[in-house]
Amino acid sequence: MNSIKDAKHELLQLMDDNNVAGFVDVAVREGSKRLPHMNLKAHRMILMLLRVGDLITYDHMVKILRPLGLTGAGHYLMWVIWLTGPIEGIMAARLMGASRASVSGIAITLEKDGLISKVPSPSDGRVTLLTLTEEGKTKIEQAMMQISDSAGLVLEGLTEEESTILLTLLEKFSAATVSKSRLRAL
């Protein structure tokens, strides 16, 4: 039991020190004690991706999206609309990998906030399209610029060659992940 207590204190200290790699190393070390046949390299890689992803997501939520009055889901739907132009809710849900009901709920909130509006389709009056309002367009573009600036700061720690290699590896990794995924659709 002492080992678990020691690991807990070590993990807490590593979190306080913002030491992601150290945190992952301890997690893998402790996991391998309990599951000795675990694929340590794969486990370490997944934990690193998840921890870094969580840190970036949290940072964007706290420093960018919340001050703009956005949620992660609201930002995502607005981004899809920004990319595609007016779009049916069912198509937005498909692009987001979300349920139609979920997108409907997000759209209701964004519409109340004046960031999107629902308009009839010019080709079929029975169909409603989600579209950004001027305020919504301004807000999503502010968020995207701030996220871009934030990503630029993160990349400052890498050389141009390293950032190219990282992007190439992430692209390969995403292709492998999608091909092996049980979900297979984004």
Image: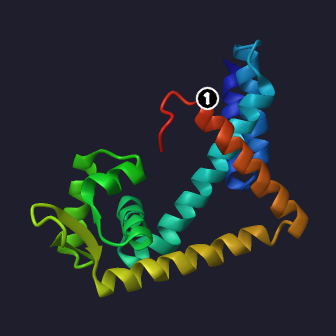
Q: Which of these two is toward me, 43 or 161?
A: 161
The amino acid type, in three-letter code, at marker 1 is Lys
Q: Quadrant of the N terminus?
A: top right
Rendered position, 41 above or below 49: above
Q: Which of these two is toward me, 21 or 4?
A: 21
Rendered position, 39 above or below 171: above
Q: Left or right? Give the position of 115 relative to 84.
A: left
Label 1 sits on residue: 180
Q: Which of these two is toward me, 90 or 173?
A: 90
What residue is at 18 percent from the left and 73 percent from the top?
122
Answer yes or no: is residue 159 visible.
no
Q: Left or right? Give the position of 25 relative to 92.
A: right
In percent of width and height, residue 146 lies at: 56, 79
Rendered position, 82 above or below 6: below
Q: Left or right? Give the position of 129 relative to 42.
A: left
Rendered position, 33 above or below 104: above
In percent of width and height, residue 101 lies at: 22, 47
Q: Left or right? Give the position of 166 relative to 179.
A: right
What residue is at 42 percent from the left and 77 percent from the top?
140
Q: Secondary structure at mark 1?
A: helix
Q: Quadrant of residue 55?
A: bottom right
Of all residues, the one furthest to the left in this rendering is 126
Q: Residues within 10 Å of mark 1 (few under 14, many from 20)?
A: few
What residue is at 33 percent from the left and 80 percent from the top?
136
